[in-house]
Amino acid sequence: MTDTKGSDRLDTLADGRLAAIVDSSFDAIISKDLNSIITSWNLAAERMFGYSAEEAVGQSILMLIPDHLKSEETEIISRVRAGERVASYETTRKRKDGTLISVSLTVSPIKNAHGEIVGASKIARDISAAKESERRIRLLMREVNHRVKNQFAVILSMVRETSKRSSDPRDFEELIRARIMALSRSHDLLVTSEWAGASLFDLIQEHLKPFGREEQILLSGPVLTLQSNAVQNLGMAFHELGTNSSKYGALGSEDGRVEITWTISSGAQGAGVKTAGAQGSGVSGGREFQLLWNETSTPHSAEQREETTRKGFGTVVLQRVAPQSLGGSAELERSPGRLNWRLSAPLASIIVPQAGVDADADAALGFGI
């Protein structure tokens, strides 16, 4: 004789366990009939779509489907009627507040006790975070591709210009290696910030660190976060200035001194800072970034002529490449025991805009590196 009470009790326990699993799931689990009317709605569905069970049950599932995707439901119901299970696919659904959400859907037929298909069960998983991550990766890859090509162009220019001014292959190799390593240091700063920019202080410190003499260097200026283009081009300039200084100037002698100061001024104060030797367009209007590299040292008589007549790749970077890339102008002055480099450029081409933050020259602080 069959124990029907025991069987019913087991069925009840199984149904209870199934209901508990559905309610505790992190995925939205929804059932509907063959007319697309919602018949069950778990807690995850409430969190995902914003409708309570009372609001959703009895309504058409079409309220979750954007207008341009409503044809999906027709196809899904057709496949469910045929007894097919719709494997996971990615699509878009609509929340109660009208916002769209990326979801992964799986749809399976629901059968009654007689094996007849009476509806469908839908499992929806929120994949918005994953889709956003994919979008950011694609954007980053495009950015990396652009920057790699740009770096190749810069390196080719370095090779071309350095070869023009190098007769010794060993000297050529040393210069190219040092310049590529300088690009790498700027690149590392940008990678650390996920290409969001780099502080001007960090950039100068990073490029002058290999030359030592930290106690002979003074930095003074407001805290600024540079755009990636400014990081690359100012980094090249600081490397050339540091290399020159270590060979012929302040960073090559015990009594030398390098002062690097930067300020922000109105366009009227700094417009058109340009001399006959400067390259690049004059800057006017808006706020300006102005930077001065000033180094002093005791001149060596044997080197005075070489120091004042030398014009290599570094000079090209300081007078043309860096200022032009930033839409500004530059002035380079050499004399025995002294070198000045002045750069003026629109502030908008230098810093990363930050809402609510106003870089002010009055906030300048001095610190040694």
Image (cartoon, rainbow, N blue to C red):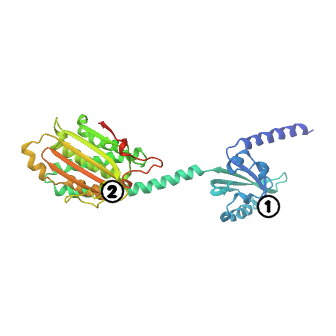
| Disc 2 crowd, CA 10 A, few/some/many (<14, 14-19, 20+) | few
Q: Point out which mark residue 268 bears.
A: 2
Q: Are marks 1 and 2 in contact (CB under 8 Å)?
A: no
Whether residue 172 appears in this view of the structure is yes
Between 186 and 241, the one lying in front of the other is 241
Query: Residue most toward the right?
Result: 1
- Please report whichever mark, 1 or 2, sits nearer to the chain's N-terminal start: 1
Camera-nearest residue between 42 and 369: 369
Query: Residue 243: image x %, image y %?
Result: 21, 45
Relative to the observer, which residue lies in front, 229 or 144? 229
Which residue occupies 22% across, 54% down? 331
Specify the amino acid type for callout 2.
Answer: Ala
| 89 vs 361: above or below | below
Residue 228 is labelled as: none
Residue corresponding to mark 1: 35
Q: Position of residue 164 (x, y in %)?
A: 17, 58
